[in-house]
Image: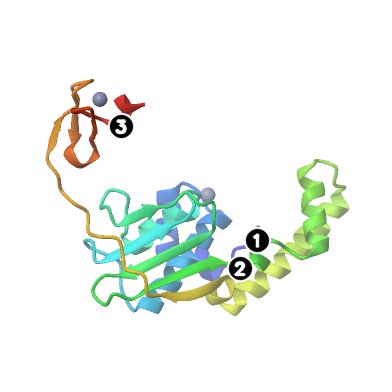
Amino acid sequence: MYIPDSITSKSDYQECARFHGHTCMGLTIGYLAATCALEHLQVKRAIDEELVAIVENDACCCDAVQVLTGCTFGKGNFFFKDHGKMAFTFGNRSTGKSVRLVLRQEVLNPPEEESRLRTLIHSGEASSGEIRRYEKLSESRLKDLFAAGPHTFFDIQELADPLPPNATIAQSIACDSCGEMVMETKLEDHNGRKLCRACEL
Ligand SMILES: [Zn+2]
Ligand SMILES: [Zn+2]
């Protein structure tokens, strides 16, 4: 796996790796997406809820997004859509501008020979020569991509959609079944009984 020193030596990248626990291509993709988007929206890391991130997967990349943008699960400005797509939307609440980045197909799907060798390696049937050939192909492809800059990894689209609303603070009341305290907005009415989502099932 090739990630250039020009990226791994950066202090913000190292901060992402510390938070995530290891260095990997997924983390790097999240790093590139967030860096690209912050530059595009001309903003810095969010102190409060001024920035919004919407991720469409729950893979390694999401950790870099949280570290770099300051959009975090806990602050309520980090949204997860379980779509299984390497797609990231970033919005700036003060300007209303938002941008969606989708990892380009060429990044995910290498050309024929590299892809065939990768399948062979995963099946455990590759010879050492084939492994070396795969590593060479993959490294030279990634080198070209990284050299061309983060923008080459993504299709980037400006969005006109409104951003998700600020996190709401609601009072908690007891569920009529389990008695546990629940944010009022998360309770459902079942024939006059207010039930939490766990009791509803
Ligand atoms: Zn990872
Ligand atoms: Zn309950």
Kind of residue at badge 2: Arg
Label 3 or label 1, whichever lies nearer to me, is 3
Where is residue 139 drawn, in percent x and y? 71, 65
- Badge 1 density bin: few <14, some 14–19, many ≥20, Cα 10 Å: few
Quarter assignment of residue 148? bottom right
Element type at mark 2: loop
Quarter assignment of residue 130? bottom right
Q: Do residues under tags 1 and 2 come within 8 Å of each other at their CB atoms?
A: yes
Where is residue 93 drawn, in percent x and y? 26, 70
Where is residue 74 drawn, in percent x and y? 27, 48
Disc 2 C-beta below 8 A from ligand 1: no
- Answer with mark 3 or mark 2, whichever residue precedes in sequence: 2
Disc 3 C-beta below 8 A from ligand 2: yes
Residue sitting at x 55%, y 71%: 154
Disc 1 C-beta below 8 A from ligand 1: no
Where is residue 92 drawn, in percent x and y? 30, 71
- Badge 3 density bin: few <14, some 14–19, many ≥20, Cα 10 Å: few
Kind of residue at badge 3: Arg
178 or 65: which is nearer to us?
Answer: 178
Going by the image, does 146 lie left or right of 47? right
Relative to 155, does residue 127 appear above or below in the rendering?
A: above
Q: Report the Cα–Cα distance between label 1 and label 2.
A: 7 Å
Residue sitting at x 31%, y 60%: 70
Label 3 or label 2, whichever lies nearer to me, is 3
Element type at mark 3: helix
Relative to 124, does residue 13 appear above or below in the rendering?
A: below
Residue linked to disc 3? 197
Residue linked to disc 2? 104
Residue linked to disc 1? 108
Kind of residue at badge 1: Leu
Element type at mark 1: helix
Q: Quadrant of the C terminus?
A: top left
